[in-house]
Image (tube, grey):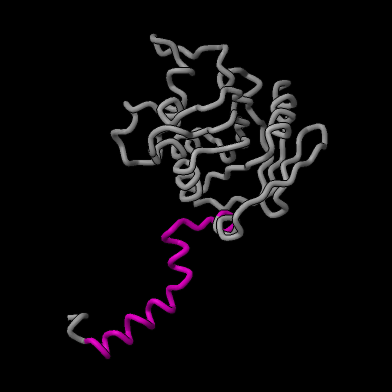
Amino acid sequence: MTPFTRLDARAAPLLEANIDTDQIIPKQFLKTVEREGLGCGLFFEWRFDEQGHEKPEFVLNKPEYKNAGILIAGENFGCGSSREHAPWALIDFGISCVIGSSFADIFTGNCANNGLLLVRLPEAQVQALQSEAKGGNHIFTVDLEQQTVTAPSGASYRFEIDPNLKNKLLKGLDAIGETLQHEGDITTFEERRKLIQPWVAA
């Protein structure tokens, strides 16, 4: 995974509550187990009409939000079915951080496993950030080390995050990478087991 330290990016406000994973990445895009290329299906039914043309009224299609790296979402973002394709699609589209007041539990775990930072803030602070994002073409800063979100106005909000998850994101560690931090201990254990239980190695 790519380490997450500090992100300076445009933020797109997506104000609806209870956006589920089928809206994030519809079922027809779930045939692949590859993480790359899913950005084309992100919010597909909201981004495109029946002819495949972009809907100009959808926030991510507006010029001022093109290449947004931050999504400011409504409450209970990521509810619905437990599809890991949802964070894959967000990341492939270029979204590295989602800010909201609450997130679905399984979606939260999938994001943690794939390096997508979820920032929880009180609803009033989320609404304040959404208001600033509505102007478009403004740069927001998410500093994971300092655990702060800074708006274009200079207003700064501190967020909480599990220390272990913070460490994994800062170092860009997925589950395999985290395990490999203990590679020396694992090798020692395996060598010792060969001597004590040689029939296992055989």
Q: Residue at x 44, y 67 (%)?
A: 180
The C terminus - image quarter: bottom left
What secondary structure characterizes most of the magenta part? helix
Residue 9 in the image, given as x and y percentages of width and height = 67, 36
Q: Position of residue 149 (x, y in %)?
A: 72, 42
Whether 184 is drawn above or below 47: the answer is below
Question: Which quadrant would residue 33 be assigned to in this image?
Answer: top left
Q: Is residue 112 left or right of residue 188?
A: right
Give the residue displayed 43% in from the left and 79% down from the top.
Answer: 185
Provide the residue span drawn in magenta.
169-197
Give x and y (percent) for residue 27. Answer: 33, 28
Which residue corresponds to the image point at 71% horizontal and 40% vertical from the top-left? 141
User: Which one is nearer the viewer's eye here, 99 or 198?
Assistant: 99
In percent of width and height, residue 148 lies at 72, 46
Q: State whether residue 197 is above or below residue 25.
A: below
The residue at 35%/41% (across/down) is 34
Can residue 184 be found in the magenta stretch?
yes
194 in magenta: yes
Farthest right residue? 154
Drawn side of residue 59 relative to residue 187, left or right:
right
In the image, farthest residue toward the top:
51
Tell me: 189 left or right of 149: left
- Marker count (numbered): 0
Quarter location, residue 188: bottom left
Residue 33 drawn above or below residue 54: below
